[in-house]
Image (cartoon, rainbow, N blue to C red):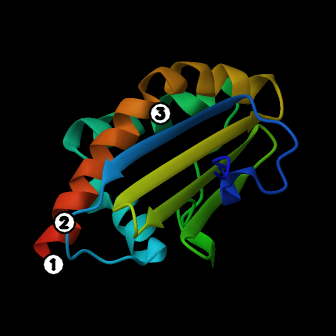
Amino acid sequence: MTAPTFRSLAFADAGRFDYGDVILASKPPGTTDDPRVWAETLFSPASAPLWVKAAMGVRMALAPLIGLESAPAGVFDVRRVEGDEALIEYVDAHLTFRCAVGVDAAAAVVRVTTVVTFNDWRGRVYFTPVSLAHPLVVNAMLHRARRILASRR
């Protein structure tokens, strides 16, 4: 018997991280196995429930109060695809965000692995409250993406 292992692009080049989570969902039958399509659908505005869009609006309004700039356009664009994972990465002076969206076709599972490293105190102050809602947000977006991709069959 082989011992199970877990590797992810989210960990690549990350010696340490301050926050991490993995959210799983079953992959609907007949949906694509392409991790880029899953990542792009997951992070599209259509996959964000209204309450998530509202939370992002609050974030954009409050972030400047602690000296954070608004996220640039394309912050959630796929940076690279390797094997069964697509990586989304954003690095700034305050924090490093890495999210790998993986598709395990054999197990019919979609996996979203997120790691965040704080690069200074502003990153910690910003992300600490975000971390409380992060699993709820990703789970909601993932389930919306499942419905969108299942409807394209």
- Left or right: residue 100 versus residue 144 is right
- Type of residue at label 1? Arg
Observer-side mark, 3 or 1, equals: 1
Is label 2 in contact with label 1 (beta carbons under 8 Å)? yes
Earlier-in-chain disc, 2 versus 3: 3
Please tell me the numbered disc located at residue 101.
Answer: none
* Residue at the (63%, 48%) spot, across then down: 4
Quarter occupied by residue 133: top left
Q: How many numbered tags mark residues here?
A: 3
| Quadrant in the rendering for residue 94 | top right
**Which residue is situated farthest in the front direction here?**
1
Crowd around label 1: few <14 · some 14–19 · many ≥20 (10 Å): few
Judged from the image, the secondary structure of the residue bearing numbered disc 3 is helix
Query: Could you tell me residue 42's position as x and y percent?
Result: 37, 59
Quarter occupied by residue 16: top right
Q: Nearer the viewer, residue 69 or 150?
A: 150
Mark 3 touches mark 1? (CB < 8 Å): no
Disc 3 residue crowd, few under 14, some 14–19, many 20+, Cα 10 Å: some
The answer to whether residue 38 is above or below residue 18 is below
Q: What residue is drawn where x is 33% and y is 62%?
A: 108
Q: Which residue is mark 2?
A: 148
What residue is pinned by disc 3? 59
